[in-house]
């Protein structure tokens, strides 16, 4: 099977496995796991932050960040398409007793004007106190599209004017960095916290890292414990992530090129009404007929992907997809 349902399906390579098996470990709740300490240090340094915190999932790193940045009764501003709102089990409400001000935006992305228009005047007792803005890059439901970095700077200025914190759900931020040729250090200048995923395009089996100031990460460590995310000799899994950030970032350009090829091939099939702009590793196809029917037929050809709506389907490229896989996928999509 050629699995294009998500970039989370990758399996560790023999080289990554060997690195994991040899990783020195210790009790991370005591702060004594050298591999986790190294992963936290290296990723924080890469993005220009003081500190990092390893956690089992990107959901947990996002939820920890929201909880540290807000108080019960607060409101955060995010796109209505955002993962923190749609796909984290209502965690904003459950973990932080915070409400979400949902912005229509465009392709899962919002603007500084959206922040200005949706900020609540704290003098008005009717309204929840706005305390946080959360962005996503690349935008998952936006089909892997990337923010223009200037938009981040504009949003940061609006946040500074109102005293709001700014969080980035960077589950696929490495895809954005590679596609746009960005310097990861710039993220540390703009955001109060960034969550990065090691288990998406980077190909590690497990884990995410939350980045921020020393003070923020000290608070985050306490919340991680409360959520049950304090792990012991977890360096064995963190090593997969360490290997991934050292070896698997620049190769994301291959995934992006493969996604572009898939989009072009799909366009030649009459079942395809349109292909949304492909900037990174996600291809969103709008179908003329039923998306599910096309998805089922592709499965009969050994190709797995997902219907995201009655007439919308998604294919995601990743490091377990070879050149010959792409040739086969493109041939089948063209209808050969
Ligand atoms: C995958 C993903 C996450 C985190 O998911 P986990 O499965 O909890 O690691 C967060 N945000 C976005 C946009 C994602 O795509």
Image (tube, rainbow, N blue to C red):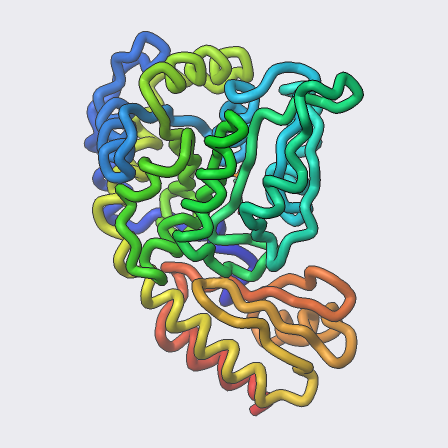
Q: Residue at x 23, y 33 (%)?
A: 45
In this rendering, the answer to whether 242 lies above or below 29 is: below
105 displayed left or right of 241: right
Q: Residue at x 69, y 33 (%)?
A: 100
Picture coordinates of residue 201, whole percent (x, y): 40, 52
Q: Does residue 153 appear anywhere in the picture?
A: yes
Query: Residue 35 lies in what quarter of the image?
Result: top left
In which quadrant will I find the C terminus? Answer: bottom right
Q: Residue at x 74, y 68 (%)?
A: 292
In this rendering, the answer to whether 197 lies above or below 302 is: above
Picture coordinates of residue 98, whole percent (x, y): 68, 23
103 displayed left or right of 25: right
Q: Does residue 57 appear anywhere in the picture?
A: no
Q: Residue at x 62, y 58 (%)?
A: 106
Q: Nearer the viewer, residue 130 or 276?
A: 130
How many numbered marks appear? 0
Picture coordinates of residue 170, whole percent (x, y): 44, 43
In this rendering, the answer to whether 107 lies above or below 226 is: below
68 displayed left or right of 299: left
Query: Residue 26 lies in what quarter of the image?
Result: top left
In this rendering, the answer to whether 304 lies above or below 201 is: below
Picture coordinates of residue 76, whole percent (x, y): 63, 31
């Amino acid at each position: 099977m050629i699995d294009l349902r998500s970039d989370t399906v990758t399996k560790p390579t023999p080289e990554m496995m060997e690195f994991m098996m040899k990783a020195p470990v210790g009790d991370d709740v005591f702060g004594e796991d050298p591999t986790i300490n190294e992963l936290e240090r290296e990723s924080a340094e890469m993005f220009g932050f003081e500190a990092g915190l390893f956690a089992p999932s990107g959901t947990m790193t996002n939820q920890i960040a929201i909880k540290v940045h807000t108080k019960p009764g607060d409101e955060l501003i995010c796109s209505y398409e955002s993962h923190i709102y749609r796909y984290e089990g209502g965690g904003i409400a459950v973990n932080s007793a915070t409400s979400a001000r949902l912005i229509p935006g465009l392709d899962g992305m919002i603007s500084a004007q959206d922040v200005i228009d949706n900020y609540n005047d704290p003098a008005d007792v009717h309204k929840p106190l706005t305390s946080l803005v959360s962005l996503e890059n690349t935008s998952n439901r936006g089909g892997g599209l990337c923010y223009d970095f200037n938009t981040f700077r504009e949003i940061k200025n609006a946040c500074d004017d109102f005293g709001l914190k700014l969080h980035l759900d960077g589950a696929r931020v490495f895809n954005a960095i590679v596609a746009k040729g960005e310097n990861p250090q710039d993220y540390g200048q703009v955001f109060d916290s960034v969550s990065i995923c090691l288990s998406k395009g980077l190909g590690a089996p497990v884990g995410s890292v939350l980045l921020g100031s020393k003070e923020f990460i000290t608070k985050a460590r306490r919340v991680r414990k409360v959520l049950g995310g304090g792990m012991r000799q977890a360096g064995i899994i963190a090593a997969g992530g360490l290997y991934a950030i050292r070896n698997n970032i620049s190769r994301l350009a291959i995934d992006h090129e493969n996604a572009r090829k898939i989009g072009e091939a799909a366009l030649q099939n009459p079942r395809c009404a349109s292909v949304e702009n492909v900037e990174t590793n996600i291809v969103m196809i709008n179908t003329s007929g039923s998306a599910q029917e096309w998805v089922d037929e592709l499965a009969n050809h050994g190709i797995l992907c997902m219907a995201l709506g009655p007439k919308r389907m998604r294919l995601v490229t990743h490091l377990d997809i070879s050149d010959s896989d792409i040739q086969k996928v493109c041939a089948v999509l063209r209808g050969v």
